Image (cartoon, rainbow, N blue to C red):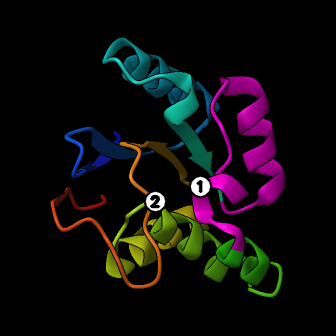
């Protein structure tokens, strides 16, 4: 079963965050997102282990959340953060509120994969998308 978090951006494009258990589910979810009209350049995958994230990027045609998405300051700060802090910072830069980023990071701790179909608005500092709808993680 997948879990979904929706974010509506100011531009009207919706950000959707889904968690899945494995690469097969990730491929299926990414294809569903493409079928819904998301372009592959706006699809991101994230796992707690950076090597697993790299593997997912390679085998799903999705993207990692990188310097362009998170901003230079966050990217540099991430060099000095723990992996959990880094993951939360990456999610925050994509508009995920702090409490939701913490929940998603906890899910990744348990082996879940986060798939983010990004609506395109960048966020910084304590900004987050106020139009978020959260579906609890099971």
Mark 1 lies on residue: 69
- Considering only order in the chain, which callout, 1 or 2, is on the residue closer to the N terminus? 1
- In which image quadrant can residue 137 be found? bottom left
Using the rendered image of the protein, determine whether residue 96 is visible from the camera's viewpoint: yes
| Residue extent of the magenta highlight | 48-72
Residue corresponding to mark 2: 94
**Is residue 54 in the magenta section?**
yes
Q: Is residue 76 above or below residue 80?
A: above
Q: Is residue 13 above or below residue 137?
A: above
Instruction: Specify few, some or many for label 1: CA neighbours under 10 Å numbering under 14, 14-19, or 20 or more.
Output: some
Q: Position of residue 118 (x, y in %)?
A: 42, 43
Badge 2 element? loop
Residue at left offset 38%, top offset 19% = 32
The quarter of the picture where the C terminus appears is bottom left
Estimate the x, y position of residue 100 in percent, counting from the top left. 34, 72
What kind of element bears circle 1? helix
Q: Position of residue 50 (x, y in %)?
A: 79, 58
């Amino acid at each position: 079963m997948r879990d979904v978090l929706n974010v509506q951006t100011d531009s009207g494009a919706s950000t959707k965050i889904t968690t899945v258990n494995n690469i097969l589910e990730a491929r299926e979810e990414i294809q569903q997102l493409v079928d819904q009209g998301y372009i592959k350049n706006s699809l991101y995958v994230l796992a707690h282990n950076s090597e697993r994230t790299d593997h997912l990027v390679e085998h799903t045609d999705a993207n990692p959340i990188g310097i362009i998405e998170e901003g230079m300051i966050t990217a540099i700060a991430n060099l000095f953060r723990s992996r959990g802090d880094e993951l939360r910072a990456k999610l925050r830069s994509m508009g995920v509120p702090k409490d939701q980023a913490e929940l998603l990071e906890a899910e990744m701790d348990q082996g879940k994969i986060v798939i983010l179909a990004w609506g395109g608005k960048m966020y910084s500092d304590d900004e987050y998308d106020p139009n978020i709808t959260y579906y609890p993680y099971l």
